[in-house]
Image: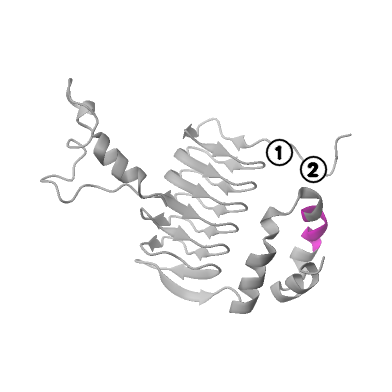
Amino acid sequence: MEDTRFTDPQPKIHTTAELRGCRMGRYCSVGERVSLTDVTFGDFSYVQRHSEGIYARVGKFCSIASNVRINALEHPMERITTHKVSYRPNEYFRFQKLDAGFRQRRMEKPVTIGNDVWIGHGAVIMPGITIGDGAVIGANAVVTKDVPAYTVVGGVPARVIRPRFQRETAARLQALAWWDWPLEKLFIAVPDMQVLSAEEFVKKWAST
C-alpha cells in the first residue's frame, strides 16, 4: 500500500534546463536554464535558476542558489592563448578536433560537495574543490580552497567566517548522518528540526 505521507520522489527538472550525463536522486529539483554536465545529485538536493555545473558530485539535502558556478571553467594559461580556439578548434575550423587531453585534465579535477551544504547566490566553486558536510558558502564567494565541514565561508577568495556549531556538535551531527535516514524516520524528525537546537537534536536522536 502506498504511503500517503510522501510526495512523488521523481526529480523535477525544468523544461529549459540542460542536463548531460547527470544522475539525480529522489526529490531533486533543477531550476530554469540550469546547465549541468556529468554531475551527480544526492536525494533532496536542488539547484536554482541560471546555475551551471560540470564534473561534480553533490551530496544529499544541498541547497544551491541561482547563478552559482560549480567547477568553473579552467583556461590553459600556459599556452600562448587562453582562448578556446586551442582546445575547441572544431567550433571554428573543419578537420580540427576537440583537444581530448585538455578535456581529460578538466575531468581529473572534479568538485565534491558534501551533504546539507548551502551555496549562496552567485558563488563560484573552482576546480578540484571539496566542500564538507554542513558547510555554508556565502553569496558571490569564490571558493579556491577546500572548505571544512560545518564551516561558513565568504568573500573573494573565500575565507572562513565562523563555524556553524561547536566542534563537538558538528562531529556528532556528521556521525548521526541524518541525511541517510529512511523517509519514515525523517518524517518523524522534521518537527524536531524546526524547534530543537543542534545540540538538543543530536542528544535526542543519537539514542533513537
Q: Residue furthest top?
A: 94
Quick one: label 2, few (<14), some, or many (20+) residues within 10 Å?
few
Residue position marked by numbered label 1 in the rendering: 9
Side of 27 where 132 appears, left or right: left
Which dot marks residue 6? 2
- SS at mark 1? loop
Q: Residue drawn at (53%, 67%), measured in percent from left and top?
A: 149
Q: Is residue 166 visible?
A: no
Side of 208 where 130 appears, left or right: left
Report the magenta residues as a range.
186-191
Badge 1 amino acid: Pro
3 and 153: which is toward the camera: 3
Quick one: label 1, few (<14), some, or many (20+) residues within 10 Å?
few
Q: Give the prevailing secondary structure in the magenta stretch.
A: helix
Q: Are marks 1 and 2 in contact (CB under 8 Å)?
A: yes
Q: Residue furthest right?
A: 1
What x and y, as percent, mark residue 55? 42, 44
Badge 2 amino acid: Phe
